[in-house]
Image: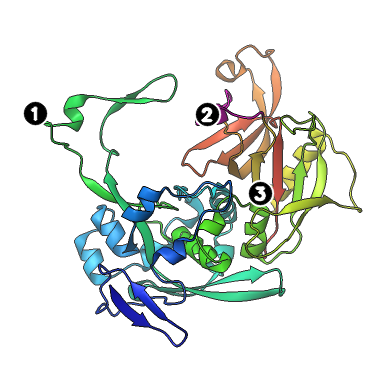
Amino acid sequence: MGLSTSRCRPVCLDAEIDLHDSRFIDVAFPPTPGSLGEAKAGKVFITQDQRQNARWVRVPELLHFNQQISAAEFSQKQQSELTWTDMHRLTHTPGSLGNCWLVATIAALARRPGAVRRLFVEAEPAAGRFVVQLFDMASGRWELVEVDDFVPCTMEDDWSDVPYEEQADGTRVYNYKDVYTETGAKRLRKKWVPLFGRPNGRQVWALILEKAMAKFVGSYANLSGGTEPFALMALTGFPLVYILQRPAADDAETSALKNHWEWKGAQYAGRTSTGIGSSRLSHVPDDLLDEEIWEKMVNYIARTCPVTASITRFPAVASVRDYYRPDGLISGHAYAVLDAREVILHNAPWLQQGLRKGVLGQTWIRRKNPHGDWKAEGGLKAGARVVMGDSQD
């Protein structure tokens, strides 16, 4: 083990971390197991095997080992481009943390790249140092959060280029010869896989923002099981976040009333209480119809406000597969809402499929799934919650 000291306390670093590297190491939130934290009761977090096998890898080394940047780019540490390229087309995905609420909110905020850029008060990619400002609701002030570019990873097989056939239930079937040699050895190369947020390609700014949030709330474990309103408050500094939610149809809250929506305000509970609640607002209608919610969503989207959606009321599940609905959405999962508009269809057989012919008015929502896919959906789903925030551009 190596020993690095700060003015506050000594920090024991992993033996594989090069202490002679001149790049920045954040001793206040060091690349050690303590920064991972311990799982909160009843929340998804990493397994014991993942914790034992975790290694802290700097972002440039991560991208270079996974063949996402060239040797020349790596040696020259030219990473300003790697940090900000295509911000509005975020393809960051969650890992083993259960923080789709944070990734969905970041994706929603990325519709306004200027709002994200302002969060990065200082960015020194070559030095591995970033300073991010996050809003602390308790003090009512922006707080500067300094982080390095170490991220916890595990070494895993790289299946990305192996051909497969997907079964009806989503299972992927691979050809034995594509995976193993004649002697039984695996053909697969290895790659570093971040335990938490996983950048697709060169985008790393969201990964750094996620790490700043982890430090902000005390550990990566404290990010598990949060809600989008907490992230919206921290990332925008806007204290009022609206929650539009269908009321429960039963005491167990396994379903929601259709065509009824409650207009609530998010209630901040504390920095480590990322799963915040909500309360009714006195100055708004008690009950809203689907049509009224649709108009509000279109209005907020047109103003480029960050909007997220999730299905929060659903029957108890017996297995992970039960979370997947026939319409392609996932119960308990958060999505970024990227667009909402009404489309007039003039005799479009490929879209009608059983609908009456003629001029059709259809409502469509374009959403981003933090697990990576983009999709346009028709209508508003049962059991849904829509979260709408604001930010200054």
Q: Is residue 182 visible?
A: yes
Foreground mark, 3 or 2, reads 2
The spot of residue 182 in percent (x, y) is 8, 28
Q: Is residue 305 visible?
A: no
In the image, what residue type sits under mark 3?
A: Val
Q: Residue at x 69, y 16 (%)?
A: 358
Judge whether residue 316 is colored magenta: yes
Foreground mark, 2 or 1, reads 2
Dominant SS in magenta: loop
- Which residue position holds label 1? 182
Judge whether residue 5 is colored magenta: no
Q: Residue at x 75, y 38 (%)?
A: 294
In the image, what residue type sits under mark 2?
A: Ser
Task: Magenta stretch: give its range.
Answer: 315-327
Q: Is residue 8 above or below residue 270?
A: below
Between 125 and 34, the one nearer to me in the picture: 34
- Which residue position holds label 3? 307
Between discs 3 and 2, the one toward the N terminus:
3
Residue that lies at the very extreme toward the left in this rendered image: 183
Foreground mark, 1 or 3, reads 1
Tell how many labels. 3
Between 117 and 334, the one nearer to me in the picture: 334
Label 2 element class: loop
Quadrant in the picture for residue 166: top left
Say few, some or many: other residues with alpha carbon within 10 Å of mark 3 (under 14 / 14 to 19 / 20 or more).
many
In the image, what residue type sits under mark 1?
A: Glu
Between 27 and 360, the one nearer to me in the picture: 27
Quadrant in the picture for residue 274: bottom right
